[in-house]
Amino acid sequence: MELKEKLVSSFMAFEDNVDVHSSIHDIRTEAIKIFEAEDFPTKKQENWKYTSLNSVLKQDYSVFPKSEKALEYKDVKEYFIHEIDSYKIIFVDGKYSSHLSQTTHDGLDVCLMSAALSKPKYKVIIDNYFNKIANKDSLSSLNTAFSMEGAYINIPKNKVVDKPIQIIHFSTGNEAAMLLQPRNLIVVNENAHVQIIERHQSLTENAVLTNSVTEIFANKRAIVDYYKIQNDNQSASLIDSTFINQKQESLAKVHTFSFGGKLVRNNLEFYQNGERIDSTMKGITIIGDKQHIDHNTLVHHIEPNCESHQDYKGIFDDKSTGVFNGKVLVEKLAQKTNAFQANNNILISDKATINTKPQLEIFADDVKCSHGCTIGQLDESAMFYLRSRGIPEKEAKALLMFAFSNTVLDSVKIPEMKTRITKLIAEKLGVNIGFDL
Amino acid sequence: MLKINNLHASIGDKAILKGINLEVKAGEVHAIMGPNGSGKSTLASVIAGKEDYEVTEGSILLENEDIEDLAAEERAHNGVFLSFQYPVEIPGVSVTNFIKTAINSTRKAKGLEDMPAKDMLKMIREKSELLEIDRKFLSRSLNEGFSGGEKKRNEIFQMAMLEPKLAILDETDSGLDIDALRIVSNGVNKLKSKDNAVIVITHYQRLLDYIVPDFVHVLLNGKIVKSGGKELAHELEEKGYDWIKEEVNA
C-alpha cells in the first residue's frame, strides 16, 4: 500500500481513540481531506522544485508506535543542553516521557499538547490559536489531521521565563520505519519572554520521518528566541514547518543549525500583524555525504515600520545538496519596511550543489529591501595566511569556515548553547582547534 | 640560514622570478627593494610556500635543507615567518586564541605537548608589552576592523610569539604612521639576535632608517640586479630606480 493510502486509512483507526465530537476533530477531518486531495508534494510544485521526497516516502512507515521504550537520562544526556537548568518536554517515539521531562503549571504552562487538546481549561486558548496560523498545504494538513501530541507552551502576560525550555523528540528504532508527527503550540503573551530549544534525534539506524508543525504566537512586545538543532543521523528525515504570528513591537528570532539528517526541509514563515515588529531568522548548515537540506522561508510584511533579517550560511561537502528559497512579501500598506536577506555558501567539493533563490515581492513604494546570495570556495590567500603561521590545512579550513559562520553564532543568547554549537561545528569539520571556538 | 640558488618561479604561464641568488646568514638583516611588479612579494610568498606559484628551476635551502616539497605550515614549523602586507580578517577568533593555535600547532608538529596556559599567558604579556599592545586588543577578533597600523603591529606580535629563525617582512611599513613605524621597528630590532635573520621587503628607504640592513638588494624584473650595503638604499631614495635599469640595460 502506498504511504498516502496507508495514512488515509490510518486516520480511521486514529478516530477510534479520540473524541470525534470535538471542534478539534472537525479541524482534523477537514485536514485529512486536504491531504487526501493534494497528496505529498512533488518537484512539479514551484516550492519543491529542488527537493524530492521520493526516497523518503518509499519506506513502509509505522504510523502509531506499537510498544514503548524507556530511555535512561544518562544514555541521552548528550542531546540535551545539560549544562543549564531548563524545563524539558521530552518525547520518545512520539510518546511523552514523564521521567525525562520537567514540565510546569506554576505561573506558566509548559506541558503537553494532548492535555491541552482534551482538557476544558485549555479550550479558550486552543479555540483561539490552534491551527490558526499553520499553512493549509498537504504536509501541514497531514500533521493537523493526526495532531495529538507535542509541546504546549503558554506564557502569560509580563512573564519572563526563568530558564530555557527544551523540546526533544527521540526515536529509538522500535519500528523498522517510523513516522512521527509532533504538533507544538506556543503562545507568548504581551511583554513575555521565552527561549526555546528544539531537537529531533534518532538513536538508531532505522528509518524515521518526522513531519513536525509548530505554531508560535508572539503577542504585543513579546520576545521569542527559538533554536533548532538538527544533527540527526543518516536514516532520519525531517520536515519542519514553523509558523510565527507576530503582533506589534514583538521580536521573534529563529536560529536553525542544520548539521545532519538524510533529508531536512525547513519551512519557516513569519507573519507580521502589527507595527514595529522585528523578525530574525538565521541558520548555519554544514553537511556532507549525500545529505540534503532545504530552507524555505517567508516573511510577510503586512503593516508599516517593521523589520526582517535573514542570514543563512551554508557549507557543503561531498555530494550534499542545499536549497535556500527565501521569500519576502511586502504588502502595499507595509511602508517603511526594512527587509534584509543574505545567503552565503561555500562548496567544499565540486560534487556539492546549492540552489539559492531569493524572491522579493514588493508592493509598497517606500521600503528598504536588500538581498544577496553568494556561492564560493574558501579564500586561498586566507588559507595561505593561516598555514604560514603553522596551522595545518585541515584546521586552517575549519577556522575559516568558523569565521564564515560567525555572524550567525554571534546572536545566540544562551552561552552554553553557543559553546555546544561551536563544538558541533568543530566535530562536523573534524578538527580540534586547540581552544573552544 | 637561507640559501637561494637560481630560483625561477611562475604563476600560470607567467614567469615572475627569473634566477634569484641570495644568501642570508644568521644574525643578518637583508633588505630587498625594487619598483612595483619587480617580484618582491612573489619572492616572499615562494619562500613561505604559497602554492599558487610554481618553482620551475633552482632551489631554496633553509639550514642546508631543501624546503621545496614542504607545505606552508611545515615551513612555518621549521622557522619561516612571513609578515603579510594584507593580513586576513578572521571574525570570531580572538588574537589570543589564534596565536595559541599557531604556537600549539608548531609544538604538535615537533612532538611537543601544548604550551602550558601559564607560560602562554606570560609570553603573551611580555610580547604584547614589547609592541605596546593593550589587553583589550588581544581579545578582539583577529584583524577584524583593525586599522592598518594595528594589523601590522599584530603581525609583528605574532612574529614575536612564534620566534622564527627567518622572518620576512613584506611591506610592513605600508600604511603605517610614524608612531606605528617606530613601535613596529623597535619590536623587530628587539627580536633580532645572532641566531635569527630578517628579510625586509620594502618600497621605500624610510623603514630602513629604523631597521638597519646589513645588505640591500635591488630586485628588477625577477632578478637581483644590484647588491650593496645600507648606503645603496639612500642612493635609491635619492635617484629612484631608473639609473639601475639603465645600468642593467647597458
Image (cartoon, helix red, strand yellow):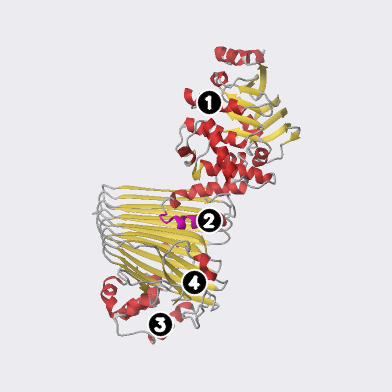
Q: How far apart are marks 2 and 4 (CA)?
A: 21 Å
Depth check, mark 3 against mark 2: the one in front is 2
Residue at position x 55%, y 43% from top?
A: B98
Instruction: State whether residue B179 appears in this view.
Output: yes
Q: Give the mark toward the camera: 1 or 2.
A: 2
Distance from Cα at disc 1 to Cα at disc 2: 39 Å
- In front of the other: A119 or A363: A119
Residue at mark 3 to residue at mark 2: CA–CA distance: 42 Å
Instruction: Judge whether A260 appears above or below A360 on screen.
Output: below
Residue drawn at 40 percent across, 73 percent down: A150
Q: Mark 3 points at which residue?
A: A11
User: What amino acid is at disc 4?
Assistant: Phe
- Element carrying mark 2: helix
Instruction: Pick out the residue farthest to the right.
Output: B64
Rendered-image quadrant of the N terminus of chain B: top right
- Co-location on one chain, circles 3 and 2: yes
Amino acid type of disc 2?
Answer: Lys
SS category of the residue bearing label 1: loop
- Give me the disc on residue A170: 4
Query: Disc number at residue A228?
Result: none
The mark that comes first in sequence, 3 or 4, is: 3
**C-alpha separation, residue under disc 1 versus residue under disc 4:** 59 Å
Q: Earlier in the sequence, mark 2 or mark 4?
A: 4
Residue B240: x %, y % from top left: 56, 15
Q: What residue type is labelled 1?
A: Asp
Percent x, y for residue A282? 41, 55
Q: Mark 3: which amino acid?
A: Phe
Where does the magenta region start and end? A412-420
Q: Identify residue for label 1.
A: B173
| Residue A403, percent from left and from top | 50, 47
- Which secondary structure, mark 4? strand
